[in-house]
Amino acid sequence: MRRAILASLLMLTLTSHVDAATLGVSVSNLDEFNSTLLQGLLAHAKDAGGVDVVTADAKGDGELQKKQVTDLVARKVDALIVLLADGDLGAQLTPIAISAGIPLVYVNNVPANVLDLPENQVVVASDEKQSGSLQAKEVCRLLNGKGNIAVLVGEPFHAAARARTEDVDNVVATADCKGLKVVERQSAYWSPDFAEAQVEEWLTAGVKFDAIVANNDDMALGAIRALKGNHGATKDVIVAGIDAIEPALEALKAGDMKVTVFQNGAAQGAGAVDAALKLVQGGKVPRENYIPFELVTPQNVDQYLAKNR
């Protein structure tokens, strides 16, 4: 339902006042987490008053996103907010905003050119050095520091996928977790369907693992479907995700999932609006603005379920 509602909002302009500042927003896709982020962005823009928002869905296509940004500039938006389909795309979008003389806020997916951004281009995200580390350390604790791990990687060119996977490797290399072994690692492109197919392939091939560590909750949920289809239960395998989306929290509550990490997408969306408006008004914003991740377990899941409702 959330995706359906957001799809109907695409290219819709939210107008509060005649002299509204207009923000052009391009999101990489409308998966569960990005939908939450976009909802937070739209709600905060509406609450701010005097703000119009024009949004577009890039459907995971970097070339389409580049065209959308060019089109938004042609519509004379006052600032751009972009959730990149590909972190490397930042190097192409930054010059477009510079030529147009308008601010650009990268949200959630940190661009590869982050260290080279001009003064009126900033990032609002969460520090990915925390996310995968929190996740992997909890998996290590649950396995008492030994066991086989299979890793489901997100979009290979997404900065978060790269960082979260590196976090897992770094945790496995520590003294407390040196008994862990990564036996499989494959990209499932953030997709529950791809993840389900990949885990089914592992199970069919006889791969033995004690935990599945997924770069996001959608893939973790796909892994759970595969495990249930193969064994009828997930009790013998620890499944861990990241984002703390509502379906994952419900899976945690049911015992099918053991770990997720809360990434406050709504706060990222709201923060992107605040940064864009401040830049439009000529103010200064730090180049990198990070919202902390939080570990979610069966012991504290109820408080996060409340946040999603």
Image (cartoon, helix red, strand yellow):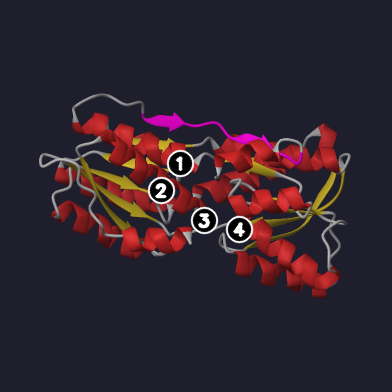
Residue 232, placed above or below residue 126: below
> According to the image, label 4 marks what residue?
218
Q: Earlier in the sequence, mark 3 or mark 4?
A: 3
The disc label shown at residue 39, or none: 2
Q: Residues within 10 Å of mark 4 (few under 14, many from 20)?
A: many
The location of residue 287, given as percent across then percent down, is 36, 30
Residue in the foreground of this view, choosing between 43 and 136: 43
Cα separation, mark 2 vs mark 3, equals 11 Å
Residue 299, placed above or below residue 87: above
Observer-side mark, 4 or 1, equals 1
The location of residue 109, given as percent across then percent down, is 45, 46
Query: Please, which residue is most extreme toward the left here?
Result: 18
Q: Residues within 10 Å of mark 3 (few under 14, many from 20)?
A: some
Residue 5 in the figure: left or right of residue 223: left
> According to the image, label 1 marks what residue?
266
> According to the image, label 3 marks what residue?
32
Q: Secondary structure at mark 2?
A: helix
The location of residue 184, given as percent across then percent down, is 75, 60
Q: Secondary structure at mark 1?
A: helix
Is there a contact, CB below 8 Å, between mark 3 and mark 4?
yes
Q: Earlier in the sequence, mark 2 or mark 3?
A: 3
Cα separation, mark 3 vs mark 4, equals 8 Å
Cα separation, mark 3 vs mark 1, equals 12 Å
Q: Earlier in the sequence, mark 3 or mark 1?
A: 3
Q: Of the residues shown, which amino acid type is indicated by label 4?
A: Asp
Q: Earlier in the sequence, mark 2 or mark 4?
A: 2
Is there a contact, CB below 8 Å, between mark 2 and mark 1?
yes
Is there a contact, CB below 8 Å, between mark 3 and mark 1?
no
Cα separation, mark 4 vs mark 1, equals 17 Å
Query: Is residue 120 among what the camera can see?
Result: no
Please give the range of residues in magenta.
287-298
Is there a contact, CB below 8 Å, between mark 2 and mark 3?
no
